Image: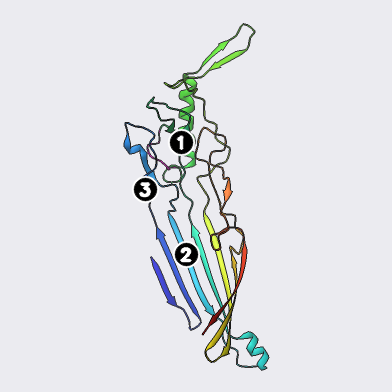
Amino acid sequence: MKLQGRLSSHLQLTVGYALARNTGFVEFSEYDNFRSAYGNMGDQRRHRLTITGIYDLPQFNLGPGVTRRLLNNWSVAFISETDSAPPLDTILTGLDLDGDGINRTLLPGTTRHNTFGRGLSQSDLRNLVKQYNDSVEVRTRRVTNPDGTVTVIRPRTPFNQVINPITLPDDFSNGDSFLTQDLRLTRRLNLREKFRLSLIGEVFNIFNIANISGYSNVLNQPNYGQPSTRAGQVFGSGGPRAFQFATRLLF
């Protein structure tokens, strides 16, 4: 949905909103169940809101000529982008629970990829992990050695891989929302009848918001749901605050 209009003789505003769903092939985790290979795409952003505007500052016709020349012919443009957080997968690596030769398995209880944050809440995921850990504990044997120590023997996969309980971090997330606000200030100078020079100053991600990403989607590693990076600085992409200056000659 897009709304565009001129609110006054000086201000033009555009508001765009997108409600998206992006699904498709992700990866095979079961050879005998092709449906499990599909799911939400990892870069899916459910909600996107973009607001842009251009404001031409009013002309000053009073006061000294120098003041009028300094204050006139200015315009301000801005872009504000807000995207919701993406989903996250629930993968176990190095484990082939069903013995089909694929060592990347979805957490039992989840049937599609990238469901955390898309119908699967943090409490739901904790409950599934608890059920998984309980099933591991039921099949775990503890043997008391002659010296009094206890040896814990975990269950194994058909390929003799040790199945350990999952330890979730105290705090984890499926991802971070994306927020950025960019601003442009332009001064127009009329050099001659057919020549006009524009002086431009821009600032990207004006509030220097840390749009973090790189969330680990591997449940049987200690950093599940933890970010590892932030958006890089490609002007206007939401990376660290950056400035840019330019000139434009029209003739």
Circle 1 packing at 10 Å, graded few (<14), some (14-19), many (20+), is many
> Which label was assigned to residue 101?
none
Task: Give the residue drawn at x 55%, y 42%.
Answer: 172
Mark 3–mark 1 distance (CA, rounded to whole Å): 17 Å
Q: Is 132 or 193 nearer to us in this picture?
A: 193
Horizontal side, residue 151 vs residue 7: left or right: right
Q: Is 163 or 201 nearer to us in this picture?
A: 201
Horizontal side, residue 34 vs residue 236: left or right: left
Choose the circle earlier in sequence order: 2 or 3: 3
Nearer the observer: mark 2 or 3; the answer is 3
Q: Which residue is mark 2?
A: 50
Choose the circle earlier in sequence order: 1 or 2: 2
Amino acid type, callout 3: Thr
Q: Is 217 or 132 nearer to us in this picture?
A: 217
| Residue 102 x %, y % | 41, 30
Q: Is residue 162 above or below residue 74?
A: above
| Residue 58 x %, y % | 56, 85
Q: How many numbered discs sit on the rendered protein? A: 3
Q: Which residue is mark 1?
A: 91
Nearer the observer: mark 1 or 2; the answer is 1
Task: Give the residue drawn at x 40%, y 33%.
Answer: 109
| Residue 182 x %, y % | 56, 66
Circle 2 packing at 10 Å, graded few (<14), some (14-19), many (20+), is some
> Which label was assigned to residue 23?
3
Q: Secondary structure at mark 3?
A: strand
